[in-house]
Image: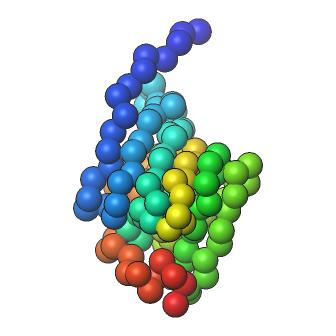
């Protein structure tokens, strides 16, 4: 057993996120046969990811604020603290904070067999995407 070393908080890159979003890793693989990554992700009000998908899906547990998750068909799901959202493999989606409050979630995902497909980043969402129009 070991206590994991703390890693610095990272601000997520503007190429994949609009607004201020910070990431703290909780768990990352130690060996080649491990796949799990867990991170706490904090979004400033209105901040959002670009469209993306995950090769093996993703679980998102909201811990603070109101999360908005959207899919390409315009469906918006609001998720509240204590609720967990699952996105299946390959589903293009975005994560966002509501306009009026910070949002925090725990992101849990497994690395794909091909690392390039673990997370596939696409274009930024529009204000219409964020609104669900």
Q: Quadrant of residue 50?
A: bottom left
Q: Where does residue 76 sit, x and y in percent of width and height?
A: 61, 77
Residue furthest toward the right?
Answer: 82
Task: Write the residue at 73% across / 54% down.
Answer: 83
For residue 72, side relative to residue 67 (left or right): left
Q: Where does residue 74 sit, x and y in percent of width and height?
A: 55, 85
Residue furthest toward the front?
Answer: 100
Q: Is residue 60 above or below residue 100?
A: above
Residue furthest toward the top?
Answer: 1
Task: Write the residue at 33% across / 73% down.
Answer: 124
Q: Is residue 29 above or below residue 54?
A: above
Q: Is residue 67 above or below residue 122?
A: above
Q: Where does residue 128 sit, x and y in percent of width and height?
A: 44, 86
Q: How is the image coloured?
A: rainbow
Task: Write the residue at 44% across / 36% down.
Answer: 24
Instruction: Count the marks.
Output: 0
Say if residue 2 shows up in the picture: yes
Pick whichever, 8 or 91, lies toward us.
Answer: 8
Say if residue 90 shows up in the picture: no
Q: Where does residue 18 sit, x and y in percent of width and height?
A: 33, 64
Q: Is residue 123 above or below residue 54?
A: below
Pick whichever, 49 or 86, lies toward us.
Answer: 49
Which quarter of the rendered picture does the N terminus lie within?
Answer: top right
Task: Write the residue at 70% across / 51% down.
Answer: 81
Q: Quadrant of residue 44?
A: bottom left
């Amino acid at each position: 057993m070991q206590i994991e070393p703390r890693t610095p908080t990272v601000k997520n890159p503007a190429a994949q996120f609009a607004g201020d979003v910070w990431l703290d890793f909780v768990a990352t693989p130690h060996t080649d046969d491990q796949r799990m990554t867990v991170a706490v992700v904090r979004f400033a009000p209105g901040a959002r990811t670009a469209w993306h998908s995950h090769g093996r899906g993703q679980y998102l547990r909201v811990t603070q604020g109101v999360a908005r998750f959207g899919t390409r068909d315009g469906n918006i799901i609001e998720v509240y603290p204590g609720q967990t959202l699952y996105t299946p493999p390959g589903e293009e989606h975005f994560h966002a904070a509501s306009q009026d409050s910070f949002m925090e979630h725990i992101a849990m995902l497994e690395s794909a067999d091909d690392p390039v497909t673990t997370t596939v980043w696409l274009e930024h969402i529009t204000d219409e995407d964020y609104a669900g129009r």
